[in-house]
């Protein structure tokens, strides 16, 4: 299996398992700056040098050697599943991507035809019934995750526990899994434990939200999108995420986690 979705600084000061829609752009830029004293000029996901990534052939050996020997601090970051799936919907389904097109080509037209999902039009201000459309998208998400139809689940809405588990199953171990809801404090703890070439001022950093401004603004609070049926679907596909990472499955309005993450439990349950 190896270590898919894993990034590492060239200095090997830290290793990060990417979880999409959980501040990964910001974390990648922090890692890059800690080595090079500057941020990457562009979307960090496009960087082909300056940061080891499992997807780059020359990076696989160094990442594998480091993680299996646990030479450096290893961490990841998770997010409230209710907010994460909403973010996936507004960014990947409703938003225009940075290439000027819809995400994954014909995916959105297929969703519109098969599931009745609406996404709005940028020329008319993205006006559509966000709640109704999101709930229909959630049915599609359930079908992809539970039944692999009409396609395999996309990385942006597949369960966080699935992403986190690959490093454990490959023989690695996490030192930290931080909550995006307490990002600055959690990331400061990571940086304090890593031998940085250059300091990073978390409070003075710009925002690295590559999807910002390219789609509709969410018009309702999180809890408005989740009725009894949609909460049932969320339980069905993300129940383990709530359990392992300490979020409240019964209250979509509660953004913050209820408790700290038990790393021993995460390793025991995801490494089996």
Image: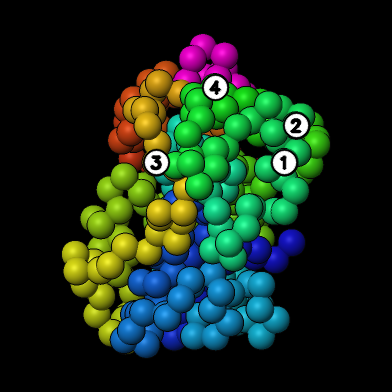
Mark 2: few, some, or many residues within 10 Å (few <14, many ≥20)?
few
The magenta segment is 226-236
Q: Is residue 178 above or below residue 195?
A: above
Q: Which mark is residue 113?
A: 2
Determine whether, in the image, residue 22 is placed left or right of residue 6.
left
Badge 1, how many Cα within 10 Å: few under 14, some, many 20+?
some
Asked if residue 80 shows in the view, the reply is no
Q: For the N terminus, give its image quadrant.
A: bottom right
Measured Cα–Cα span from mark 1 to mark 4: 17 Å
Secondary structure of the residue carrying numbered label 2: helix
**Is 168 left or right of 215, judged from the image as shown?**
right
In this view, 128 is above or below 94? above
Tell me the distance, in whole angstroms, between the alpha carbons under discs 3 and 1: 21 Å
Instruction: Give the mark nearest the N terminus, 3 or 1.
Output: 1
Packing grade of label 3 (10 A; few <14, some 14-19, many >=20) is: some
Within the magenta stretch, is there residue 228?
A: yes
Q: Predominant secondary structure in magenta? A: helix
Q: Residues within 10 Å of mark 4 (few under 14, many from 20)?
A: few
Q: Which residue is mark 3?
A: 217
CB within 8 Å, label 2 to label 1:
yes
SS for tag 4? helix
Residue under circle 1? 109
In this rendered view, identify the residue nearer to me: 68 or 138.
138
Rendered location of residue 17, percent (x, y):
52, 61
Q: Residue at x 76, y 44 (%)?
A: 152
C-alpha span from label 3 to label 4: 15 Å
Which of the two residues, 257 or 152, is positioned nearer the viewer here?
A: 152
Q: Which residue is mark 4?
A: 132
Residue in view at x 36 percent, y 79 percent: 39
């Amino acid at each position: 299996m190896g270590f898919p979705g894993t990034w590492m600084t060239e200095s090997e000061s830290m290793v990060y398992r990417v979880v999409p829609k959980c501040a990964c752009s910001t974390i990648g830029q922090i890692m890059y700056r800690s080595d090079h004293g500057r941020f990457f000029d562009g979307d960090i996901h496009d960087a082909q040098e300056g940061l080891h990534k499992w997807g780059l052939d020359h990076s696989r050996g160094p990442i594998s050697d480091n993680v299996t020997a646990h030479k450096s601090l290893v961490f990841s970051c998770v997010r409230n599943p209710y907010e994460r799936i909403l973010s996936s919907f507004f960014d990947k389904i409703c938003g225009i991507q940075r290439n000027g097109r819809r995400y994954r080509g014909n995916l959105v037209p297929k969703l519109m035809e098969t599931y009745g999902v609406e996404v709005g039009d940028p020329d008319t201000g993205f006006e559509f019934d966000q709640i109704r459309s999101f709930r229909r998208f959630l049915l599609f998400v359930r079908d992809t995750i539970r039944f692999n139809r009409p396609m395999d689940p996309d990385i942006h809405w597949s369960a966080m526990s699935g992403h986190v588990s690959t490093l454990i199953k490959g023989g690695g171990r996490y030192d930290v899994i931080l909550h995006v809801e307490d990002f600055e404090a959690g990331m400061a703890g990571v940086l304090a434990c890593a031998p940085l070439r250059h300091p990073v001022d978390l409070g003075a950093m710009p925002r690295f939200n590559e999807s910002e401004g390219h789609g509709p603004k969410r018009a309702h609070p999180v809890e408005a999108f989740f009725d009894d049926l949609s909460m049932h679907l969320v339980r069905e596909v993300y129940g383990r995420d709530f359990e392992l990472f300490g979020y409240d499955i019964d209250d979509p309005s509660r953004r913050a986690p209820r408790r700290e993450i038990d790393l021993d439990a995460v390793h025991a349950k995801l490494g089996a």
